[in-house]
Structure formats: C-alpha cells, structure tokens
Image (tube, helix red, strand yellow):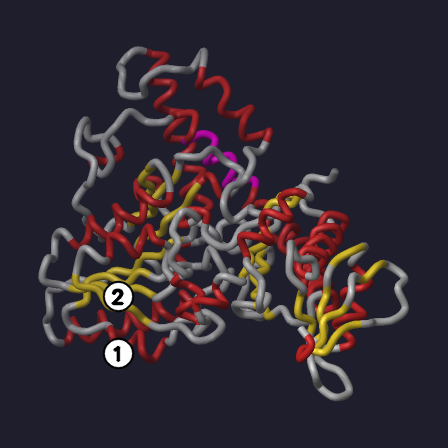
Amino acid sequence: MMKIYLDYAAATPVDPEVLRAMQPYFSEKFYNPSALYLDARATAKDVQDARAKIAKQLGVRPSEIIFTAGGTESDNLAIRGVMEQFPNANLVISAIEHEAVLKPAHLYNYKEAPVNSDGVVDLKVLEKLIDSKTVLVSIMYANNEIGTIQPLREIAQIIKSKIESRKLAKSALPLFFHTDACQATNYLHVQANKLGVDMMTVSASKIYGPKQMGGLYLNARVKLSPQILGGGQEHGMRSGTENVAGIVGFATALDIVQNNRLKEVARMRRLQELALDLIRQKIPAATINGSSKHRLPNNIHITIPGQDNERLIMLLDEKGIQCAAGSACSASNEEPSHVLSALGLTDKATQSSLRLTMGRDTDERSIRYAIEELALAVYTTFDSPKIVHSQSELSRAKTVLSEGEVAIATSREEKPFVADRIRSGDGGVSGKSSKEL
C-alpha cells in the first residue's frame, strides 16, 4: 500500500542536510554558548553565524533576530510584548488568524478585520478599524488552512499613512505591523524590509527543520516586554540556554527552502492544478475554498457537501493517505473552523471540508492515487445509500466504485430513487421510488 503524506502545513520531515548540520551539537559541540572557555565560545560563534544566515534571508540585521521555541511563542512575544506596554491601546487582527495570534489578542482590546469569500482581508474596513488608539496590526502572510496570501505591502502602506497622520497630529503613540509568516516561508519571499513589516514570525518546523524552533524578526525601533525572564539571552528578549542544534538546523533549513523556492513553487503549482482538475472531474460537487489567484501553491482546501470530514480522513488513512480537516493545532477542538466561518461557510459545510497540503515528497503519482481514493470514499458509505444528484454523477460514481451503495436524486420524473448495489460494469440502474421506501 502506498503511503501518501498530504499534511505538510501541519509538520514537515527534517531535511537530511539539516539533520547532518545539527548532529554535532548533540555530542562533541554540546557546550553552553554563554560559557567563557574556548569550546563554548566556538559554539557561541556558530549561533551568531546561524543568526546572520537567517537575517540575510529575511533582509534584516542579525541583531533583529530573536530565537524562540516556535511560531506560537513568537506570536505571543510580538503581541503581548507590545500590548503590555500600552494597556489602554488596541490592536487589529484579521478574522482568520492562527490561534497563536487570536488567543493572545483576546487578552486585550482588539478588533477583527473581516475577509471576503476568498479569505483576503477587506482593506477598506481594515483602514477604518485602525484608529488613534491602535498600537499594533497583526495580519498573517498566508493562511494555514485555506492558503490565501494577504497583500502585506498594501497593508504596510495603509499603516505608513496612519503613522504620518499621527506625526502631523503630534501623537506619541507608535503603530507597529506584525505578520505570522510560518506557512509562507517555503513558497514566498520573506524579505521583511520589502514587505514593510516591523515584526515577522517564522518557524523551523514548517520548512523541514526541527520542531520547537522558531524566530521573531524584531525591527530595532520596536521595544517589547519580554515574556520569559531569566539569564537575559537573546538581547534580554527571551531568556533560556540557546537551543544550538535547533538554531543551526533552522538556519540551514531556511537557506535550503529559500534558495530552491522558485523551482519548488513551479513544481507545486503543476501538482496543485492537476489535483484540482481531478477533483473537478471525479467529485464535481466539491467546491474550492480560498483564493484561486492569491494562494500558496501547495494548498488544496475543498468542501464536499453531505460528507463528514472525519469519516473521509479515516477512510483515506486506511488507504495510506494522510490529510487533515484544518489546522492541526486545533484538531482537538470540536468547534467549527473560525477560518471557514469567516468565509461565510455554514457549520455543516465546515464539517464537510478537507485540507490537502503538498510538499517535497509529493509527486504526480501520489496525487492521482489520493484523489482516486478520495472519490471512492465520497461515493462509498458504511450503511446507507449515497445521494448522487444526476445521472452524470452516477456515471462518475460507477467509474470509481468497485462495489458500493449509491442513490440518484433525479430521474425523468424528477423523483429520487435508490439504486440497488452497483457493481463495476453494471449497465443499468434499478431501484425503487422514494415513495416506496
């Protein structure tokens, strides 16, 4: 049985080159970088070299990189680090932010900017929400569920205009712009200086690096209240002995993904188009969630009316296909996806949605197999007939079913009837009128 992993938005395997770069720091280079002896100072230099590599990829100064234990900590440091200094101020976020932004934002006076049906922030509303007491705007670069990419440069221009207005009004309240770029780092450029952001969250675990390793770009003009106190590491912003192996792995992983980004984007885009074409052919009732134009090239998010996504995930798992209903960080939460709700989907529709995210090991064969098995799962039920809405859908069902119960909801008299068990090659449909059932 093939094993197909289609949940790269949740986690990525560590790149072998990254692992090789990390290994010495688990044994012969185990030293604490804060110690004074020669070997420890050499380890400290390795940390600074890694910091410089990351800074180069982000287009910032090494002193502006703060190492953390991942994206969640970086988001919390950015939001709480600013808001604790301005308790009477407010912040603005989008309605589809990751919980690592939503949860800390809820601790303060916050506003949510709505998104359109594609998941793109409404810029006109966003501009109105930024008032004279707003100190922070946090808008993610690319969404972790639907893959929609936000227009950060346009948002940065809005914020810049607001800052100029404050200068004219002689207001001393600062206004900062933060973005969570965890999902974007594989496929988009992350030059923070060109994006116009003051703070940017990045995570190693999404780019074939180690888990529990991340960073926050912090513009020199931004002052934060540290959230973890202790020995004063990371310029006093994040105390704790440095995770040297993780830092070196992070820098190596970021170099690899950014240096190979354009080639991988082109490959992902071809596979994405193939997957969407197959879905349209084999599961015509499915709808695509998110933007068709401004979307991560590895993301496929669909709603299949009448289906239960947990059931589909289990059926696919039995066939060696691993995918998700949405954010892995919220998988234990029974509440409907706030991202899909923000797009206007009903609770029922959110529970009929699947996320497939591709990565380095994804190829054409795996995509064809995955969509074929998904179609089979859609047209197969455990103990009740499956409603099919047209004769053409019945024909499609027969092409993917070897054996399964199917019902057709239209006939010449437009009366629903339930088909008997269909077998491959069965030429006709026999059944009872719905009035007889």
Q: Secondary structure at mark 2?
A: strand
Dot 2: within a 10 Å radius of its alpha carbon, few (fewer than 14), some, or many (20 or more) residues? many
Q: Which mark is drawn over residue 128?
A: 1
Residue 305 in the image, given as x and y percentages of width and height = 58, 69
Check if mark 2's residue and mark 1's residue have beta carbons within 8 Å. Answer: no
Identify which amino acid the numbered label 2 is placed on: Val
Identify which amino acid the numbered label 1 is placed on: Lys
Work out which quarter of the rendered image holds the C terminus and state it. Answer: bottom right
The residue at 69%/44% (across/down) is: 319
Work out which quarter of the rendered image holds the N terminus and state it. Answer: top right
Residue 340 in the image, given as x and y percentages of width and height = 45, 66
Dot 1: within a 10 Å radius of its alpha carbon, few (fewer than 14), some, or many (20 or more) residues? few
- Nearest the viewer among 302 and 402 is 402
Q: Secondary structure at mark 1?
A: helix
The residue at 64%/48% (across/down) is: 316
Residue 129 in the image, given as x and y percentages of width and height = 25, 74
Does the magenta stretch mainly form a helix, a strand or a loop? Answer: helix
The residue at 82%/72% (across/down) is: 430
Position above or below: 383 against 27? below
- Assess whether residue 240 is covered by the magenta stretch: no
Q: Is residue 183 left or right of residue 114?
A: right
What range is drawn magenta here? Answer: 247-256
Going from N to C along the chain, the mark reached first, 2 or 1, is 2
For mark 2, what is the residue? 92
